[in-house]
Structure formats: structure tokens, C-alpha cells
Amino acid sequence: MNSTAAAFVHSPELDAYHYPADCPFSAQRAGKARKTLAELGLLAGDGRREVAPKPATRAELERFHAPEYLTALLRAAGGELDAAGLNMGLGTPDCPVFPDMYAYPEAACGASLTAARLLLAGEVSIAFNPSGGYHHAGPAHAAGFCYLNDVVLACQELTGHGRRVAFVDVDAHHGDGVQAAFYERDDVLTLSLHESGRTLFPGTGFVDEFGHGKGRGYSVNVPFPMGTYDAAYLRAFEAVAVPLLTAYAPDVLVLELGMDGLADDPLTNLRLTNNVYAEIIQRLLQLGRPLLATGGGGYHVENTARGWALAWSVLCGADESVELSAGLGGVMLESSEWSGGLRDRELPVDRRRRRLVEQAVDAAIANIRENVFPLHGLSA
């Protein structure tokens, strides 16, 4: 394997798809991130390259999704939504009916499968599909802007070739669809760090959800209270994720990089800066495993695109000076709120918020150490 090779998996065709104008989800975020990276010269040279994916085939989608669901989804995209489709989660405010509702997730799934195959072939050690990360979709159900689950398909591709996978999800929403897919398996460790289901969709992802049967201990959830800030989030990651990932020793890492944990996201209640994601990527890279990254949530479009640009700069090993030059060297970040580079400014944390968040984080860490760590040979 070329340990320095990194692939940005994207194509202009992905930018052509659109959710309805009144939907908070934007399919243009990946293209905006790509535009910034191109202006910074971070898509070619030094082992970096762009790879254009092909849409997933029907047979590939049926490895996880029910044929009748795929048929209902295709019909709905053509304007035919019946009771069966409604019962599958189609036609809701978060999963609206629109012409691109089949073609876009089909293309996004193809991009994540392409990323997985690049890793399996040893062509690259890093692959990033910012158009992926649809972690809520079930085998026959749409939810949370997600119609097809590219993450599950990519993990299946990897495990189908004998790889043990660790899926790390830092989207603000719990990765319920991925957790459910592997809840009784031990060849995929799912680790989700998210805002508590008590205050945010999908209302799941509590510490007592840690797998069943053969998969007992292989689903791990770290729910955070509203207002969680960088230091508390990173402390939980170091206390929980790092020991578990080290003990599990996966062959491949899969990372969902939803940017909806950022402080200004309109749909969530965390208070993070994109520095958290940069730090987590650095920590994961230290494990020395191939890494497949996807996008995910993020409903402040400009901040999400900038966060993904920062994520790629870390993933592909760009010099840190590039992160600052984005704001100073004429690169247009398309944001009126911040022009200081790819990294966010630090945010102050008041004493009351710090106390409340720390109590909740301490309790989650203690619970996981007591109930999950021993299942991996770790001391509580």
C-alpha cells in the first residue's frame, strides 16, 4: 500500500443533484468543499488525486436494501408515491419526494463503494467521499434525509473481503441505521459520538445500547448533552474511543464526518468548532490503518463545506500553513462570518455550561468503562 496516497472521491455529476429548496439538506456542500480545495491546490500532487465514482448498481444496493423498497423509492422519484412508500418513510418532511431522490443516493453509495475498493486494492490509504454518510437509512426505510445507506454498503464491502472494520461516527445525530445493521456482529465495531437522543433525532444511541449476542460490546455510544464544547468532546473521545479502537485493532477505519456538531448548525445543539474534527482525524491517523471517510450532516452549508475542506487537508497530510492561507491568500470561502482560514476560532465556555456538560460526560465515560471495556479485555 502507498501509505501517502489519498483519494478525494467526487465528480461534477454529484453536484448536479438537488434536494427540494425548502429542505435543510444541501447536496451542494461537497462541491463547495471541493472548490475550496481546488483553489488551495490540495486535489493533486503529493500522492493526492481525485477519483470519479460510478453510481451503485441495483445488485449492489440489494446487498443491504430490500428490493421492494428500492422499487418504491424509484417509483416515488417518478412521482408515484403510494401507501407502501409512505410506510417506508417516504414523503415526510425529512425524507421528501423529489426527482433526484433515487439517483443522488445511488450515486453517493457508488462513491463510498469506490472509496472502499480503492482501499481494498491498496491504491490509497485514505479515501474521502464527502457526498456520503447516510447513516439513518434502514434496509426498507428512509429517515433523516437518508434514503440509501452508503456507510453500511461500504462496511459490507470491506468485511466481505475479510477486513475487520471500526466505524467512528462524529455526526451530531446517532448513527442508528449503521448500528442496527451490525448490532449482532463482531467484525464491525460501531462507535457513535453524538448529541443525546433525549434532545435530538433519532432519539437513540444511549450508553446501554452496546450490542447483542455475538455483537455484545461492539456497539458503543457516547451521548452528549446540549452545549457540549470542544474540550469535553475530545476528552470523551480519548477516554472511550482511543482505548477501544486500540484494543479492537481494526483492519480498516470508516469515519463519518458530519459537521452538524458545529456551534452554528441550525438543527442541533452542540457547540463544537471544526478543530475537534481535525484533532480526531489526527488521532485516528496515528492508528496507522487505512481510512475511509464520508460526509454526513451539516446544515450550515458554508461552515460544513469549510469543515470538510479542513478535514481533507488533515487527511491528505497538507502543511498546516494551508489551513491559514485559505483565509489570507485570496481563496474564497463563501462565508461572511469568518475569513481567518479553514480552522474555526475558539469559542468561550461559561462556568455553568462547563459544569453541566462535565457531569454528563463523566457519567457516560464511567458507564462505558464499566459495561463495555471488560468485554474488550480493558480494565474499567
Image (tube, grey):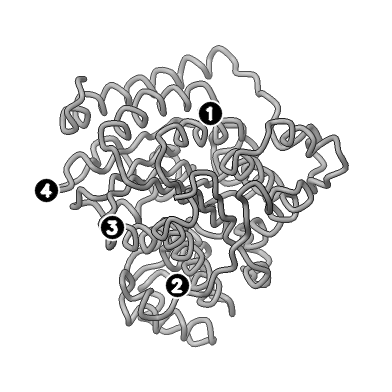
Residue type, mark 2 in image: Leu
Per the model, the C-alpha gap separating discs 2 and 4 is 32 Å
Image-quadrant location for residue 379: top left
Quadrant assignment for the C terminus: top left
Say which of marks 3 and 4 sits in front. 3
For image coordinates 57% across by 44% down, the residue present is 259
Which residue of the protein is positioned furthest toward the top in this rendering? Answer: 351
Kindly state the secondary structure of the residue where label 1 is placed: loop
* Left or right for 249, reference 41: left
Q: Which mark is residue 90?
A: 2
Q: Earlier in the sequence, mark 2 or mark 4?
A: 2
Kindly state the secondary structure of the residue where label 3 is placed: helix
Question: Contact (CB < 8 A) between labels 3 and 1?
Answer: no
Per the model, the C-alpha gap separating discs 1 and 4 is 35 Å
Image-quadrant location for residue 198: top left
Q: Residues within 10 Å of mark 2 (few under 14, many from 20)?
A: many
For image coordinates 47% across by 67% down, the residue present is 109
Tag 1 residue:
227
Residue type, mark 1 in image: Gly
Residue 266 on image: x %, y %: 62, 45
Residue 74 on image: x %, y %: 46, 83
Kindly state the secondary structure of the residue where label 4 is placed: helix
